[in-house]
């Protein structure tokens, strides 16, 4: 599932590609991917200019000229492609937004969605999310205060979107490997040094993920050299050597989620 770095990469690239552009046409391939009847959705979105594109947690928010919003959540397996008809991937398209001869294709939205919402509806939809972990206001002190109120394991806490916004299964493993903390460790077992390491590892790993374009396998457009440059330290590397201590990386299941760690240098 795309996480904060992937969605931030999409945001910056799409802002340069379609920001200020008019949506000339809309096609819906899967009605369940939207939240209104097809004809109504198409009528309301067509001929609107995209004023700006924002990100909140794992969501993208397309601000339209009439001050309505398209709220995108890709969920598991969702991705996008921007380009001409002849360049589009040979995949089923759930939604297509056209900008003249260029099109933004939404692919793999079996669980994901693109909803047309009012400002009030967007606020309600996003209102339960935790703080943005790369926001300047998210300080070490703020992180420690949040952690003091939590129970359970550090991994399940990091991926709880109502606690911290934007971290998912992949980057939580990366963060905890970088911080040298076992993902199954209970919050109340962590000392102040470990919590401090966890905070700075959140900043380091997510900023690195953004800088390297996240881990999406599919490019956003033909010739896209930015998307997908992030290389995992530990996630999905079971059986390979830890780059820090050369111990073999193992896989565990924590709260029904695949979890990857180094059994030697994560304590």
Image: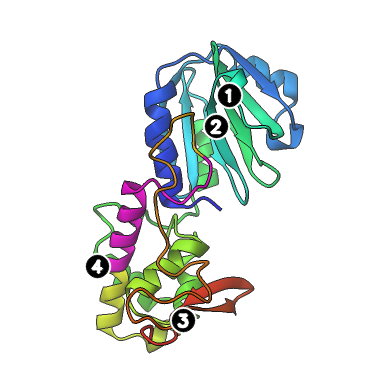
- Horizontal and vertical percent for residue 128? 50, 54
First in sequence, mark 2 or 4: give its number: 2
Residue assigned mark 3 = 248
The magenta stretch is 200-218
- Horizontal and vertical percent for residue 97? 59, 22
Residue assigned mark 2 = 81
First in sequence, mark 1 or 2: give its number: 2
Helix, strand or loop at label 2? It is strand
First in sequence, mark 4 or 3: give its number: 4
In this view, 125 is above or below 12: below
Asked whether disc 3 touches disc 2, contact meaning CB atoms under 8 Å apart, the reply is no
- Horizontal and vertical percent for residue 153? 48, 80
Q: Nearer the viewer, mark 4 or mark 3?
A: 3
In this view, 64 is above or below 240: above
Overall secondary structure of the magenta section:
helix
Asked whether disc 3 touches disc 1, contact meaning CB atoms under 8 Å apart, the reply is no
Asked whether disc 1 touches disc 2, contact meaning CB atoms under 8 Å apart, the reply is yes
Looking at the rendered structure, which numbered label has been put on residue 140?
Answer: 4
Q: Which of the pair 15/141 is nearer the observer? A: 15
- Determine the CA span between mark 3 and mark 1: 41 Å
Position of the C terminus, as image quadrant, is bottom left
Helix, strand or loop at label 3? It is loop
Crowd class of label 2 (few under 14; some 14 to 19; many from 20; radius 10 Å) = many
First in sequence, mark 3 or 1: give its number: 1
């Amino acid at each position: 599932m795309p996480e904060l770095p992937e969605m931030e990469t999409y945001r910056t690239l799409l802002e340069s590609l379609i920001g200020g552009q008019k949506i000339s046409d809309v096609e819906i391939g899967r009605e369940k991917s939207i939240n209104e009847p097809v004809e109504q959705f198409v009528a309301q979105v067509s001929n609107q200019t995209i004023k700006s594109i924002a990100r909140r947690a794992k969501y993208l928010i397309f601000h339209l000229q009439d001050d309505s919003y398209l709220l995108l959540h890709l969920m598991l397996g969702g991705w996008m492609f921007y380009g001409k008809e002849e360049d589009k991937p040979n995949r089923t398209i759930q939604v297509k937004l056209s900008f003249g001869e260029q099109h933004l294709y939404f692919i793999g939205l079996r669980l994901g969605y693109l909803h047309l919402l009012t400002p009030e509806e967007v606020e309600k939809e996003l209102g339960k999310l935790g703080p943005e972990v790369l926001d300047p206001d998210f300080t070490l002190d703020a992180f420690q205060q949040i952690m003091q109120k939590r129970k359970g394991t550090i991994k399940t806490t990091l991926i709880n979107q109502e606690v911290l916004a934007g971290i998912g299964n992949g980057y939580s493993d990366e963060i905890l490997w970088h911080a040298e903390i076992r993902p199954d460790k209970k919050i109340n077992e962590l000392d102040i040094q470990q919590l401090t390491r966890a905070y700075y590892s959140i900043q380091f790993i997510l900023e690195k993920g953004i800088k390297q374009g996240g881990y999406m396998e599919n490019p956003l457009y033909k010739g896209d050299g930015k998307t997908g440059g992030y290389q995992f330290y530990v996630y999905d590397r079971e059986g390979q050597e830890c780059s820090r201590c050369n111990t073999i990386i193992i896989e565990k299941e924590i709260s029904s989620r695949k979890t990857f760690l180094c059994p030697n240098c994560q304590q």
